Image (tube, grey):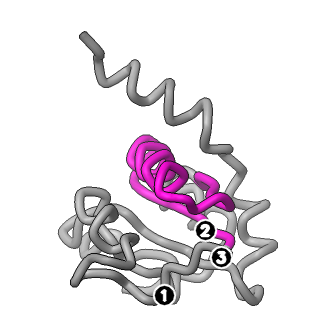
């Protein structure tokens, strides 16, 4: 039987985590895709990364699957994907799913608060 800690450890083992300051260096680059995986209620309270896609963790499998009627065409397999959430756990778990779905260039940038502290652009 697995615990949440086990799932998180597995995700952290395959999804690199980088500092928000390092992710900020890639913000605005061609092929860089920033995604906030928190639910809309959390985003409405704090805001998010300016221009980030807003795809909740629980909906990512549908959004990332080209055969799904809910596929988000912005998700390209060759994109450099930067995931953010509240503290880093949901981003890691989402990143593992994306890697299993064939998205190779996926990193976890931690929590939205880290992005704000790094001076990253935000929006409501």
Tell me: 82 left or right of 56: right
Distance between mark 3 and mark 2 Cα atoms: 6 Å
Q: Residue at x 32, y 77 (%)?
A: 67
Q: Residue at x 49, y 49 (%)?
A: 100
Q: Is residue 98 magenta?
A: yes
User: Which of the two labelled residues, at mark 1 and mark 3, occupies the earlier sequence position?
Assistant: 1
Residue 25 image position (x, y, % from top left): 81, 72
User: Which of the two labelled residues, at mark 1 and mark 2, occupies the earlier sequence position?
Assistant: 1
Give the answer, above or below, for where 41 lies relative to 57: below
**Marker disc for residue 81:** 2
Q: Quadrant of residue 28?
A: bottom right
**Marker disc for residue 84:** none
Residue 118 image position (x, y, % from top left): 68, 64
Give the magenta-colored segment's residue range.
80-109
Q: Are marks 3 and 2 in contact (CB under 8 Å)?
A: yes
Say which residue label 1 marks. 74
């Amino acid at each position: 039987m697995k615990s949440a800690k086990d799932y998180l450890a597995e995700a952290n083992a395959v999804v690199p985590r980088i500092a928000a300051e390092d992710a900020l260096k890639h913000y605005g680059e061609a092929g860089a895709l920033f995604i906030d995986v928190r639910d809309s209620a959390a985003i409405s309270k704090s805001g998010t990364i300016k221009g980030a896609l807003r795809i909740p963790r629980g909906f990512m499998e549908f959004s990332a699957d080209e055969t799904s009627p809910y596929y988000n065409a912005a998700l390209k397999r060759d994109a450099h994907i930067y995931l953010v959430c509240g503290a880093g756990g949901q981003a890691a778990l989402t990143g593992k799913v994306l890697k299993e779905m064939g998205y190779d260039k996926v990193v976890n940038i931690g929590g939205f608060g880290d992005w704000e502290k790094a001076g990253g652009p935000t929006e409501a």
